[in-house]
Image: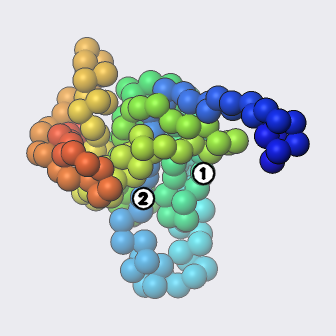
C-alpha cells in the first residue's frame, strides 16, 4: 500500500532481542480438571498461577503470556530462567500438581508484548519433552550457564518437531 501511494517502500526493521525462554506446563491438567470439577480446578489453577507469577518476578523474568495451564516467560539470563523453572516445579509440587519446564536461549522477534520466532518454538518443543517435575534445557542454555553452579544430567539427542536438526537436551539436576 505504501509503495502504491508514495512510489517508495520503507524497509521496516524487525525488532529482535536475545532472550531466554521458559515454558511451563501442568502435567495431566485435563485429567486433573475432570477429577476435581470446574470450581476446585479453577481454585487450584489460581494458586498455581499466583505462585508461578511470583517466581517469575522473583527471578526478574517477564511474563509473556499465560497459556491456560502454563506460562511463557522471558529472562535476560539463562541462569535466572533455569532457577525460576526449578522454583516453579517445587511450588507446583507443594500444591499437589506436577509441572514440566523447557528452557532455551536465542534471538526472538518482538511482536508488541509477545515474542515469536524459532527460538520460542524450540523452547516450547523442549518443554513438551520434559518429564513431570523436570526442567529440560537445550545445549545452548547448558553452555551459557557454565560456572553458575547449576548441574545437568544428559537426556540424549532428540528430534524437535518442525526443526531440521537434532538437539542435545539436558535435565537440571536436583540440588
Q: Secondary structure at mark 2?
A: strand
The quarter of the image holding the C terminus is top left
Residue 117 spot, x, y in % from top left = 48, 43
**Residue at 56 percent of width and 37 percent of height:** 109
Inspect this view and state whether residue 58 appears: no
Horizontal arrangement in the rendering, residue 34 relative to residue 102 (left or right): right
Disc 2 and disc 1 in contact, CB within 8 angstroms: no
Mark drawn on residue 25: 2
Mark drawn on residue 65: 1
**Residue at 38 percent of width and 26 percent of height:** 79
Residue 146 spot, x, y in % from top left = 25, 18
Quarter occupied by residue 81: top left
Q: Secondary structure at mark 1?
A: strand
9 in relation to 40, above or below: above
Quarter occupied by residue 96: bottom left
**Residue at 23 percent of width and 33 percent of height:** 139
Image color mode: rainbow
Front disc: 2 or 1: 1
Quarter occupied by residue 7: top right
In the depicted view, which residue is nearer to us: 45 or 139? 139
**Residue at 47 percent of width and 79 percent of height:** 33
Amino acid at each position: 500500500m505504501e509503495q502504491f501511494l508514495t512510489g517508495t517502500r520503507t524497509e521496516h526493521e524487525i525488532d529482535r532481542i536475545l532472550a531466554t525462554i521458559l515454558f511451563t506446563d501442568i502435567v495431566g491438567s485435563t485429567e486433573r480438571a475432570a477429577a476435581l470439577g470446574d470450581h476446585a480446578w479453577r481454585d487450584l489453577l489460581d494458586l498455581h498461577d499466583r505462585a508461578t507469577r511470583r517466581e517469575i518476578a522473583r527471578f526478574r523474568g517477564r511474563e509473556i503470556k499465560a497459556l491456560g495451564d502454563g506460562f511463557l516467560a522471558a529472562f535476560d539470563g539463562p541462569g535466572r530462567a533455569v532457577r525460576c523453572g526449578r522454583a516453579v516445579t517445587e511450588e507446583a509440587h507443594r500444591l499437589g500438581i506436577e509441572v514440566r519446564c523447557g528452557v532455551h536461549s536465542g534471538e526472538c522477534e518482538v511482536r508488541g508484548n509477545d515474542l515469536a520466532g524459532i527460538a520460542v518454538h524450540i523452547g516450547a518443543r523442549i518443554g513438551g519433552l520434559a518429564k513431570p517435575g523436570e526442567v529440560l534445557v537445550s545445549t545452548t542454555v547448558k553452555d551459557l550457564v557454565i560456572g553458575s553452579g547449576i548441574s545437568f544430567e544428559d537426556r540424549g539427542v532428540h528430534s524437535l518437531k518442525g526443526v531440521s536438526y537434532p538437539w542435545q537436551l539436558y535435565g537440571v539436576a536436583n540440588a
